[in-house]
Image (cartoon, helix red, strand yellow):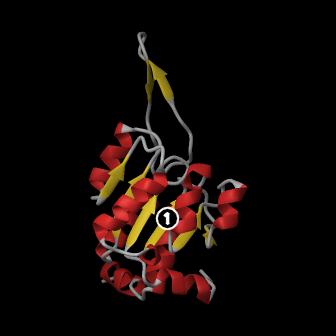
Amino acid sequence: MNVPEEISARARPIKLLLTDCDGVLTDGSLHYTFDGKRVLEGAKVFHVHDGQGLKFAREAGLKLGVISGRVSPPLAARARELQFDHLHQGVDDKLAVYEQIKIAEQIANEQIAYIGDDLPDLAVMRRAGLAIAVANAVDEIRECAHFVTSKPGGRGAVREAIELILKAQDKWDALIRNYAR
């Protein structure tokens, strides 16, 4: 991955990675089922490479969080499994939650990366030290991003963003050595 120095410089101080869910951790598809009485949200599909990347991020000392506009039990389960530090669902004002997390973590904007795909992510992306858009994000999100992944949401984009950050922080090679023994 050939990353401009300006992007690497933004990635070096990152201590917290925040992300949206639908369209970033998933491909954005919503699956509904009907049990004969009510409509239920069905399965969410998370990519294994993104999950492994999130484990790498945690191993490297990054904190993790999700700010999602929707409420989803599958997301809550995935966040528990991956030991996310912050999980906020059903959020209308993502910037307000971002600010609460920033205060709780006692860190600056420059130490936060955010991955988004759609307009509800715009205010947070304008505030974060490293704003990352997935490849299939809407135009306004790609335009305000410091970095746009080559992979779409739900298909390895989060892993790509994590590799960028960990390589800029000179932590990637040590992780690789742990797996190449």
**Res. 131 image quadrant:** bottom right
Q: Position of residue 125 (x, y in %)?
A: 55, 63
- Specify whether residue 116 is in view: no
> Measuring 43% from the left and 54% from the top, which residue is drawn there?
96
Q: Amino acid at mark 1?
A: Tyr
> Measuring 48% from the left and 56% from the top, which residue is drawn there?
95
129 sits left or right of 139 in the view: left
Task: Say which of 48 and 77 sits in front.
Answer: 77
Q: Position of residue 87 (x, y in %)?
A: 34, 52
> Measuring 32% from the left and 45% from the top, which residue is drawn there?
76
**Residue designated by label 1:** 114
Numbered disc 1: secondary structure: strand
Task: Say which of 110 and 118 sits in front.
Answer: 110
Q: Position of residue 153 (x, y in %)?
A: 56, 55
**Res. 108 image quadrant:** bottom left
> Measuring 27% from the left and 51% from the top, which residue is drawn there?
80
**Depicted 41 relative to depicted 106: above or below:** above
**Res. 14 image quadrant:** bottom left
**Depicted 94 relative to depicted 143: above or below:** above
